[in-house]
Image (cartoon, rainbow, N blue to C red):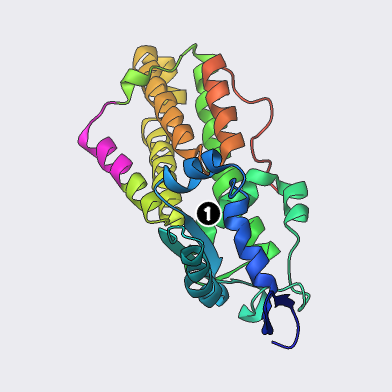
């Protein structure tokens, strides 16, 4: 290495920028000045889980582990390796290549939760994944504006008009619900966030299908009690969807839970169509 910070007592060696950067993993959580805070996040949590790009594997899996052992600290518990986000032609996004998309621009136009959605569901957790503004807009309209957002508006509007409140007991602990919860938990534990989001969107599709098949908005005119029961079930399912969404689309999930609590339909769509 022709440049760097000279190692004390050994001018033949230098520190490279990676040394300082990697130390941030532990200095940011208290080491060595606040060991109580450090133990909370590094020891009591079960160990360090790292995320890194596939081009950082040598630094993360070899150099950083050696640095930890040299300091008398335990190595990382797990290292999760991400693929690249690619632009046009499958080329890795890079500021130096000029093909990067500004996250701030996306957030300003669509909101932070829309970007969170795309990153967690539309990008593969471990392989290379393409990103274009066109693909983002298509996914936003299909799955947020027409999907989740439309479901929230329809269910809450029916609930408000028919004075139906949420009863959490309506969502029973049957085998199907337990299986969904188990699938959801297992995908998160293996850091497969896309599959976890797929579990949630299966519930969204199931709720949409239930509305289409039962048509409570029509049934309320002929069999109001039956319609109110169906709407109550949909409201409880929406509550479960919002709870599952909390780690992913935190702002949206909180909005949905608050709307259910107040019994009001949203004044404007959660995700306006673009």
The percent position of residue 190, horizontal first and vertical second, equals 37, 56
Q: Does 140 sit above or below residue 243?
A: below
Outermost residue, front side: 9
Asked whether the viewer can see residue 141, the reply is: no
What residue is drawn where x is 56% and y is 15%?
262
- Within 10 angstroms of label 1, few (less than 14), some, or many (20 or more) residues? some
What residue is drawn where x is 44% and y is 60%?
76
The residue beneath circle 1 is 120
What residue is drawn where x is 48% and y is 74%?
62
Outermost residue, left side: 175
Pick the front one: 68 or 229: 68
Q: Does 8 sit above or below residue 191?
A: below
Considering the numbered disc 1 on the image, is that residue within a helix, a strand or a loop?
helix
The percent position of residue 136, horizontal first and vertical second, equals 64, 59
Name the dominant secondary structure of the magenta segment: helix
Specify whether residue 24 is painted magenta. no
What residue is drawn where x is 51% and y is 55%?
121
The percent position of residue 22, horizontal first and vertical second, equals 61, 64
Q: In the figure, is residue 105 to the left or right of 64? A: right
- Report the span colored magenta: 172-182
Asked whether the viewer can see residue 182, the reply is: yes
The percent position of residue 45, horizontal first and vertical second, equals 43, 44
Pick the front one: 154 or 183: 183
Pick the front one: 104 or 169: 104
Occupied quadrant, residue 193: bottom left
Q: In the figure, is residue 246 to the left or right of 234? A: right
């Amino acid at each position: 290495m022709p440049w760097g910070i000279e190692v004390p007592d050994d001018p033949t060696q230098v520190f490279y920028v990676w040394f300082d950067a990697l130390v941030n993993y532990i200095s940011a959580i208290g080491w060595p000045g606040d060991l109580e805070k450090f133990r909370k996040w590094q020891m009591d949590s079960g160990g360090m889980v790292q995320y890194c790009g596939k081009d950082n594997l040598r630094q993360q899996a070899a150099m950083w582990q050696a640095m930890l052992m040299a300091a008398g600290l335990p190595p990382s518990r797990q290292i999760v390796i991400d693929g690249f986000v690619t632009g046009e032609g499958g080329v890795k996004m890079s500021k130096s290549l000029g093909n990067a998309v500004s996250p701030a621009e996306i957030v300003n136009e669509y909101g932070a939760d829309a970007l969170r959605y795309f990153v967690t569901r539309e990008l593969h957790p471990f392989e290379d994944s393409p990103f274009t503004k066109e693909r983002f807009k298509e996914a936003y309209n299909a799955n947020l504006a027409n999907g989740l957002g439309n479901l929230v508006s329809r269910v809450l509007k029916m609930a408000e008009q028919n004075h139906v409140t949420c009863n959490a007991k309506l969502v029973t602990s049957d085998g199907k619900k337990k299986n969904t919860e188990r699938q959801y938990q297992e995908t998160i534990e293996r850091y497969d966030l896309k599959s976890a989001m797929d579990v949630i969107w299966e519930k969204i599709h199931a709720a949409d299908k239930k509305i289409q098949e039962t048509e409570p908005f029509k049934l309320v005119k002929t069999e109001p009690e039956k319609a109110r029961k169906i709407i109550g079930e949909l409201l409880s399912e929406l509550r479960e969807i919002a709870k599952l969404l909390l780690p992913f689309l935190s702002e949206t999930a909180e909005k949905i839970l608050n709307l259910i609590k107040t019994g009001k339909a949203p004044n404007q769509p959660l995700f306006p169509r673009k």
